Image: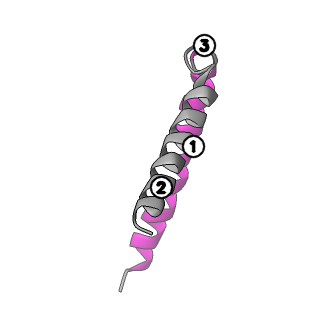
Amino acid sequence: MFSKAQYTFGAIFAIVFIGFIIWTYIKDIKLHKYYYKNVWITTIGIVLAITLFRIITFWLHD
């Protein structure tokens, strides 16, 4: 379905794109540590809210 050149282009594009994402993350790691230092609290809150809604939904439909 695809030619050899299309597979080559796809592989090179994927490698360059992933490399760029990694480079950008490493460059911004100091900002991530500053702005996202308490993100785990938000994550726990979201997981608890979703769990609570699922429990209530299953409990009401029983």
Q: Main secondary structure of the magenta part?
A: helix
Residue 62 % position (x, y): 45, 69
Mark 2 secondary-structure assignment: helix
Measure how far apart labels 1 and 3 are at the Cα level: 24 Å
Residue 33 place in picture, x, y as percent: 64, 18
Q: Amino acid at mark 1?
A: Gly
Residue nearest the observer in this picture, 37 or 43: 43
Q: Which comes sooner in the sequence, label 1 or label 3?
A: 1
Q: Does 17 sit above or below residue 37? A: below
Rendered location of residue 46, percent (x, y): 51, 38
The one of 55 and 38 positioned closer to us in this rendering = 55
Spatial CA span between label 1 and label 2: 39 Å
Q: Secondary structure at mark 3?
A: helix
Q: Counting residues from the N terminus, which is met first, the one under dot 2 or under dot 3?
A: 3
Stretch in magenta: 3-31
Residue drawn at the location 45% of the way across and 72% of the way down: 7
Q: Amino acid at mark 2?
A: Arg
Q: Which residue is mark 3?
A: 34
- Mark 2–mark 3 Cα distance, whole angstroms, equals 33 Å
Rendered image: mark on residue 54: 2
- Under circle 1, the secondary element is helix
- Whole-percent x, y for residue 8 in the image: 48, 67
Three-letter amino acid code at the position of disc 3: Tyr
Name the residue rendered at 51%, 63% in the picture: 11
Other-residue count near label 2 (Cα within 10 Å), few / some / many at <14 / 14–19 / ≥20: few
Task: Give the label, 1 or 2, closer to the camera.
Answer: 2
Which numbered disc covers residue 19? 1
Q: Residues within 10 Å of mark 3 (few under 14, many from 20)?
A: few
Residue at 45 percent of width and 49 percent of height:
53
Tag nearer the camera, 2 or 3 = 2
